[in-house]
């Protein structure tokens, strides 16, 4: 692009505009007005991500239930052992 000036016609406004000019006349963002774009952008999870999260939640729930059942199983075995000992004592 040719740049020509006639005498000292360039004004401070023009010099400021020229310094901000990027990519053939498209002004760049000004530093004072810019706000974080994260404020305006929202990440929307994909369908696959939603399914994965549901799967992980269900798996976690099932693992907790398995732990509870195993504890109950251990408690029942202990109760059974105690009852066997009591029966043996009664027989003697």
Image (cartoon, rainbow, N blue to C red):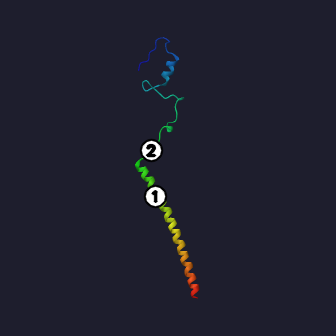
Residue drawn at 53 percent across, 75 percent down = 77
Query: Residue 64 or 16: which is nearer the viewer?
Result: 64
Quarter of the image with the N terminus is top left
What is the x, y in percent for residue 27? 46, 26
Q: Is residue 23 above or below residue 12?
A: below
On the image, the x and y values in percent for residue 13 come to: 51, 18
Q: Residues within 10 Å of mark 1 (few under 14, many from 20)?
A: few
- Label 1: state its secondary structure: helix
The residue carrying mark 1 is 58
Q: Quadrant of the C terminus?
A: bottom right
Question: Residue 34 location, x and y as percent?
Answer: 52, 31
Residue 86 placement: quadrant: bottom right
- Residue that carries the numbered disc 2 in the rendered image: 44
Q: Secondary structure at mark 2?
A: loop
The residue depicted at 46 percent of the width and 56 percent of the height is: 56
In the rendered view, tell whether residue 38 sits above or below residue 49.
above
Q: Is residue 63 above or below residue 85?
A: above
Crowding at mark 2 (Cα within 10 Å: few <14, some 14-19, many 20+): few
Direction top: furthest residue: 7
Residue at horizontal 56 percent and vertical 85 percent from the top: 88
Q: Residue at x 46, y 14 (%)?
A: 5
């Amino acid at each position: 692009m040719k740049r020509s000036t006639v005498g000292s016609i360039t004004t401070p406004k023009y010099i400021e505009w020229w310094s901000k000019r990027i990519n053939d006349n498209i002004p760049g963002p000004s530093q004072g007005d810019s706000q974080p774009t994260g404020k305006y952008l929202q990440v929307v999870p994909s369908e696959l991500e939603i399914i994965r999260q549901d799967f992980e939640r269900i798996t976690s729930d099932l693992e907790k239930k398995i732990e509870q059942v195993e504890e109950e199983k251990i408690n029942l075995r202990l109760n059974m052992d105690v009852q066997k000992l009591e029966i043996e004592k009664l027989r003697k």
